[in-house]
Image (cartoon, rainbow, N blue to C red):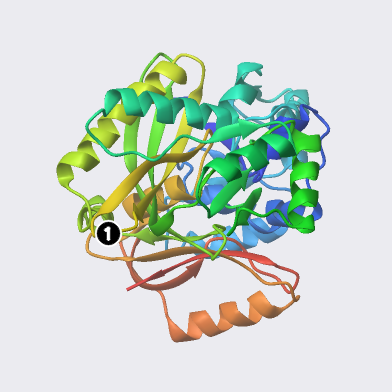
Amino acid sequence: MCIPRIHYFNPGHETAVLSGKVNYTPPRQVQTMFRDLACLPLWYADSKDLVWVEEYAMAEAYLSVLRRVFPQLPSVISTERFLHESSLGNYDAAPWGLSLQSLHYYKRLQKSEKGNVRIPVWNDVYKQLTGRQTARKVLERLKELLPEMVLPVTPVFCRTVDEIKTYMQTHQPPFVLKTPFSSSGRGLLWLCSSELLQKDLLWIDGAIRKQEEISIEPALDRQQDWAMEFVSDGKGRVSYRGLSVFGTAERGAYSGNILGSESFRESFILSHISTTDFVQVKNALEIALSEIYGYLYTGCIGVDMLLYRQSGYSSWNIHPCVEINMRQTMGMVAVQLSERFLDVNATGQFVVDYARLSGEIQMRDREMQARYPLVTENGKIRSGYVSLCPITGDTHYWAYVIIS
């Protein structure tokens, strides 16, 4: 029998892992995302789970409306209500991402005498597995498992500006530099030439001071972003869970996912590469991830990938391991949304957006509701728009689906 979980949304956890502090304070913008998207786990949690929020009254009001259409949604709970509930059972802690900070946060709930929360024990190896160095290790293993496939060069990690300059002098631009602990398009520096400008030197100096080293690699002619989502059982087995096809902004920041059946999502990739290559990459990743993560970590793993063009070639190539996210991911949310809440023939988009001005998202939400009325049948979306989290005049981050 599965123990229900208490979910907690803690985005940007890679920097929390880097800090190594139980009392780590995220940047202000990340704190805003914590608050605005706290209800996102409602859409991937099981019906008997709980979603932990602090603004309980707003979340409960939002949920009470949605339950009329989606009765399978779980319940929300706040710290105060958890500590004072008359009867609670046993739960597993399920943060978006594991860090000393997120696990320490759950200890507040252990003060309750009415229930018990089982919290994973932090393992120092999680820091190593979270960093981009492990993605490099997986890419090297994939080259061993896929000797006939043309794969991109592995990143080189540098600890000084001189090492970076040496790399740039011996390789052709453009380049991309990456901090080891970052994700979703953050922590990247794009260089179009072999010359470092003053602003580049300042970025490199700050990144090395904070994270000790950074990686450099040739920037590829990206055609399509995608990912494979996996689940590790902690007993040595990492299994494929689904395909994520997503978009990014100009500099690589995540913008949203394609929704639909697995075969529909696959069509975006298989129109450019062979089914054989797709299956070989999936199988090789299951082997490599099982070897490296399988006995050490239990939970979701997302492997970001690219389809790219090489100069002088008409065919598209696969970069099978751009980065690895050892956590729940927006791609996995998209897989779960597609399976749980979409009509069998429905397709659409899962979007995460940001607006700087207060009131802007509230206005756009009203416009979307009027323009794309929600049509459902038996708890499944046939068409229309739905916001995945409550919206107020002070909302700045917005997660929603729009289905055709």
Residue 166 in the image: state x and y as whole percent. 63, 38
Percent x, y for residue 152?
39, 40
Q: Amino acid at mark 1?
A: Phe
Locate residue 361: give its quadrant: bottom right
Is 287 rendered above or below residue 179? above
Residue 196, placed above or below residue 328: below
User: Circle 1 — which element?
Assistant: helix
Indicate left or right for 6 with 333 as reference. Answer: right
- In the rendered structure, the answer to whether residue 393 lies left or right of residue 138 reads right
| Residue that numbered label 1 is attached to | 268
Image location of residue 40, percent across then percent down: 56, 52
Q: Residue furthest front?
A: 169
User: Callout 1: few (<14), some (14-19), or many (20+) C-alpha neighbours within 10 Å?
Assistant: some
72 vs 295: above or below: below
Label total for image: 1
Q: Residue at x 56, y 28 (%)?
A: 133
Query: Image quarter for residue 15?
Result: top right
Q: Residue at x 34, y 30 (%)?
A: 285
Q: Nearer the viewer, residue 279 or 22?
A: 279
Locate the C terminus by quadrant.
bottom left
Residue 241, position in %: x, y?
33, 37
Q: Which residue shows up at 42% across the image and 31% down it? A: 139
Between 347 and 144, the residue placed more toward the observer is 144
- The answer to whether 84 is drawn above or below residue 184 in the figure is above
The N terminus lies in which quarter of the figure?
A: top left
- Residue 309 at least partly seen: yes
Residue at image coords 52%, 50%: 42
Q: Quadrant of residue 233?
A: top left
Out of 109 and 316, give the one closest to the viewer: 316
